[in-house]
Each structure stands twice: as C-alpha cells, then as structure tokens.
Image (tube, rainbow, N blue to C red):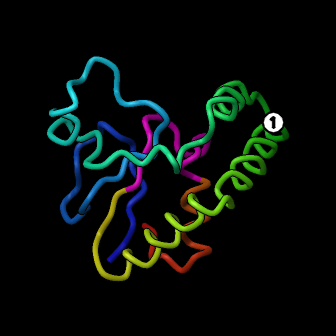
C-alpha cells in the first residue's frame, strides 16, 4: 500500500488512506473539528515539517543553489532521532496501509514534501 504525496486541502483520491499533515501550522480560519472533512489532514505531524527558519528559507529560495541549501538543512533536521523514527514508521506502514503525506504548497517541486518523498523512498516506502 503506498504513500501518496499530496497538497493539503486538495480533494482526497480513492484509496488515499490516512492523511498526516506535515506542516508547521494548522490551516488558518478552519476549525480543528473540520480539518479532516475539509481534506486538510487527519493527524497533525509538525515534526515532519521544516523548522520556522527553514520554512522561510524555502519560501525565499530564488534559484537552484538556494533550494539545494534548503534541502540539505531540512534533511539534517529529518535525521534527528524523533523525526527519523517517524519517517521509519511511515515507511513501514506503507507496506500495510495507504497514507497521504502532505503540505499546503502549490508546487511540490519547491516544497518540503518533495524531500519527504525522497526520504521515505530511501527508507523503503512504496511512494506514489
């Protein structure tokens, strides 16, 4: 069963499964009770989002060199024990159930979820 990489707030696809939200902040103006019904996320996992400083760095990355610097730093954050263990868990779960890991960014190529895709695949997760 795969891990889908999605944009939070987008309509759920059939078979997508549980949607962990890997974002630093909950969606603005949305009551907590409506996060899942509005297709944001089922469980909040801010541990798998970049630190606030790195969020800013990613948002202001204007060229490939700046983006690569963000990726290096974010991967270092994801190598910390708690985040690494959570990635291991998601990778293992991908062999038993469907999951959909996501973020709000419109373009995956310049979003931390593209890095999560790489890190999950490196851990043996089945990623779509």
The C terminus lies in quadrant: bottom left
Give left or right: position of 71 versus 81. Answer: right
Front position in the image: 112 or 32? 32
Q: Position of residue 106 (x, y in %)?
A: 47, 34
Give left or right: position of 58 versus 19. Answer: right
Q: How many marks?
A: 1
The image quadrant of residue 100 is bottom left
Q: Residues within 10 Å of mark 1 (few under 14, many from 20)?
A: few
Who's the residue at 38% across and 75% down the image? 94
Give left or right: position of 93 versus 110. Answer: left
Q: Residue furthest front?
A: 81
- In the image, is residue 81 above or below residue 47? below
Q: Residue furthest top?
A: 29
- In the image, is residue 74 above or below residue 62? below
Q: Residue furthest right?
A: 65
- In the image, is residue 95 above or below residue 71? below
The image quadrant of residue 104 is top left
Front position in the image: 42 or 5? 42
Who's the residue at 79% across and 40% down the image? 64
Q: Is residue 107 magenta?
A: yes
Task: Please state the extent of the stretch shown in magenta in the rendering.
Answer: 101-114
Q: Position of residue 88 (x, y in %)?
A: 52, 72
Front position in the image: 55 or 118? 55
Who's the residue at 38% across and 61% down the image? 4
- Label 1, secondary structure: give it: helix
Which residue position holds label 1?
66
Q: Position of residue 65 (x, y in %)?
A: 85, 40
Q: Is residue 40 magenta?
A: no
Who's the residue at 36% across and 72% down the image? 2
The image quadrant of residue 1 is bottom left
- In the image, is residue 6 above or below residue 8? below
């Amino acid at each position: 069963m795969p891990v889908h990489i999605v944009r939070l707030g987008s309509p759920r696809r059939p078979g997508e499964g549980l949607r962990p939200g890997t974002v630093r902040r909950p969606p603005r103006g949305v009551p907590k009770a409506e996060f899942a019904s509005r297709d944001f996320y089922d469980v909040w996992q801010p541990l798998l989002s970049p630190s606030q400083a790195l969020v800013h760095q990613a948002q202001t990355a204007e060229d490939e060199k700046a983006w690569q610097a963000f990726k290096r730093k974010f991967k270092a954050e994801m190598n910390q024990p708690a985040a690494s263990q959570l990635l291991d868990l998601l990778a293992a779960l991908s062999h038993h159930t469907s999951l959909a890991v996501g973020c709000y960014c419109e373009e995956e190529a310049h979003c931390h979820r593209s890095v999560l895709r790489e890190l999950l695949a490196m851990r043996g997760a089945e990623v779509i």
